[in-house]
Amino acid sequence: MVNLLLFLEEGPYRVAVDANLGGHIIEYSINGRNSLAEDKPEIGSTFWPSPQSAWGWPPPYILDKAPYSVAKSEGEILVESAVCQQTGLQVVKRFQLHQGRLTAIYSMRNRGNTAVQYAPWEISRVAGGITFYAGMLEPLSQSTGQVEHINGVYWHSYRPEQQAHHEKVFANGSAGWLANLNNGLLLVKQFEPVPAELTAPGEAEVEIYAHGDKYHTYIEIEQQGVYEVIPPGESIEWQVIWHLTEWHDDTIVAGSTRLVNEVKALLSQYRP
């Protein structure tokens, strides 16, 4: 198989996309330090149609891990999946790097003969750390992971040695961002908030999955868009903005006002 690693570079920032691995973002780094998980069983950031109940498990291979074709790789990265017979979808991913921010634009095209209904879903694996988001609503009842609610922000601290099982948090009513601090890197994902009534059935706007194997540690920071009908031959598009900065403080704990203020500062530098 031909090596299809595609790169975007700007100053201290670098993005790598593996077209042979489902068009995954496998690197978003600053000064050579990658914010995404690099060790198996799961690496990088992927994209699925939501809800999971539409396809069960594992995710559709054609969309998740099969090779994507490269439509463009100069100045930006544009990759396309084959058509997934299971869902009727073709996924197109466009990536751009500007002023250190990674813009990910996902399209779901309905290549079938009947209308389908899905929400876009970005799943980003990081090695661990503390994950947090501002929210107006309590996590949903199906949540099995624990969060702390402090001053309008929900905090999840990954402690795999204390988990007996995999855990997951489901939440709606976010402020349109989801952040992770791990090993001195602050990663923030920015997206359009989704009203609770427009989320996919059984899913949520923000989800945090904590892998419960202390020998293979990682978490997934996930967010979803609007659950909507896609007529035959048409598509829906969804954008996520990633921000990354170094954070030189090893004493951060849940509830840190400084950390929340840093997220807000990063977000204030970008206006859609």
Image (tube, rainbow, N blue to C red):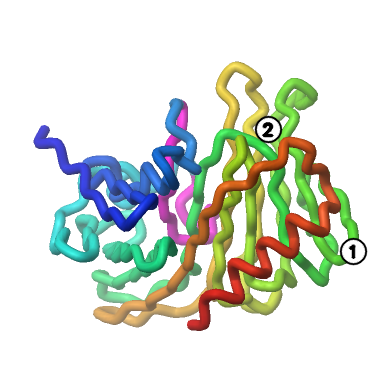
Q: Residue at x 49, y 78 (%)?
A: 228
Query: Where residue 156 sits in the image (x, y, percent)?
Result: 76, 45
Residue 87: quadrant of the picture: bottom left
Amino acid type at circle 2 is His
Magenta stretch: residue 42 in it? yes
Name which of mark 1 and mark 2 comes first in the sequence: 1
What distance separates the C-alpha of mark 1 from that of mark 2?
Answer: 27 Å
Q: Is residue 24 magenta?
A: no
Q: Which mark is residue 166?
A: 2
SS for callout 1: loop
Question: Residue, x 64% and y 55% (percent of image)?
Answer: 179
Most extreme residue toward the left is 2
**Residue 9 percent across, percent down from the top left:** 29, 54
Quadrant the N terminus occupies = top left
Q: Which mark is residue 151?
A: 1
Report if residue 59 is visible in the image: yes
266 or 156: nearer the eye? 266
Q: Nearer the viewer, residue 223 or 58?
A: 223
Q: Nearer the viewer, mark 1 or mark 2?
A: 1
| Left-right relation of 195 to 92 | right
Image coordinates of residue 157 in percent, x first then y, are: 76, 40
> Circle 2: is it few (<14), some (14-19), or many (20+) Cα within 10 Å?
some
Q: Are marks 1 and 2 in contact (CB under 8 Å)?
A: no
Look at the image and give the residue range highlighted in magenta. 41-56
Residue 89 visible in image:
no
**The residue tagged with tag 2: helix, strand or loop?**
loop
